[in-house]
Amino acid sequence: MKFTKLEHSGCVVEKDGLKVVCDPVEFEAVIPELDNVAAIVITHKHGDHLQPEKILAILDRNPEARIFTTEDAVSEIPNSEIVRHGDVVMAGGFELKFFGENHASIVPGKIPCQNIGVVIDGKIMDPGDSFDFSLDISQPGILLVPSTAPWCKVSEGMEYIKAVKPKIAVPVHNAVLSNLGNGFNDNWLRMACEEVGAELAPLEVGESVEI
């Protein structure tokens, strides 16, 4: 199984020639055209995760792709399907197990919107904009760990790594950081990885790892 980082929090997971795409966005990087896409997961409706024009471009090349998202985002994405915590869906040979419910709070006590995380084939865990995790997944191969955000401190990312105990942690939600800022945060996340025997993989856009 091949994992490729897209810009910000996006990724592509490929197996047997088919792909699952999560939160594909474009800001400065250009995401390559994607073929053989079986499923698209949009974790929530914020514009740094949901860009309808990018989804439509993928659908133009992959009209049979299924799209999964939250109830409050479904109206913004044509032909999308609502998924909730505990749902398990098979798409193109991939098992998609969904977890979580709400976006992490930016202002204490206020929930910005719904959020859904996904575990792909029991190996890759993408929480979206949250620190939720699926309790029945033991030591996933890859954890997408939020690095920085208005709702996120690097210390929270460190605690998330230590709670989930992945084999590999990939920093995400980091398009808002400079190269220097990414380096600072990666050093702290790496310390947490070392405590639990994990590897930190600070991938650039378009870089991949096999799992």
Image (spheres, grey):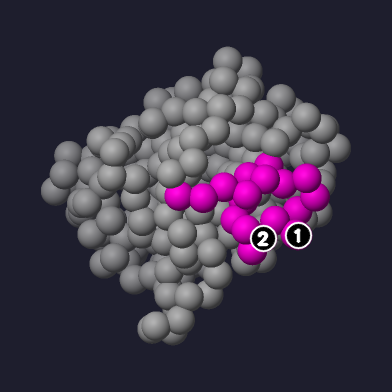
Question: Which residue corresponds to mark 2?
Answer: 73
Q: Provide the secondary structure element on which disc 1 rests.
A: helix
Please name the amino acid that badge 2 sits on: Ala
Q: Residue at x 56, y 27 (%)?
A: 90
Q: Is residue 134 above or below residue 183?
A: above
| Range of magenta residues | 67-85
Mark 1 Cα shell of 10 Å, populated few (<14), some (14-19), many (≥20): few
Residue 206 makes an appearance in the image: no
Q: Residue at x 23, y 59 (%)?
A: 159
Q: Is residue 72 magenta?
A: yes
Please name the amino acid that badge 1 sits on: Glu
Q: Quadrant of residue 57?
A: top right
Question: Which residue corresponds to mark 1?
Answer: 76
How many marks the image carries: the answer is 2
The extreme right residue here reads: 60
Residue nearest the observer in this picture, 126 or 95 = 95
Q: Quadrant of residue 180?
A: bottom left
Q: Quadrant of the C terminus?
A: top left
Q: Provide the secondary structure element on which disc 2 rests.
A: loop
Q: Residue at x 63, y 45 (%)?
A: 68
Residue nearest the observer in this picture, 187 or 58 = 58
Q: Which label sits on residue 24?
A: none
Task: Locate residue 195, reporting x and y percent.
Answer: 14, 48
Mark 2 Cα shell of 10 Å, populated few (<14), some (14-19), many (≥20): many
Task: Locate residue 21, reporting x and y percent.
Answer: 62, 39
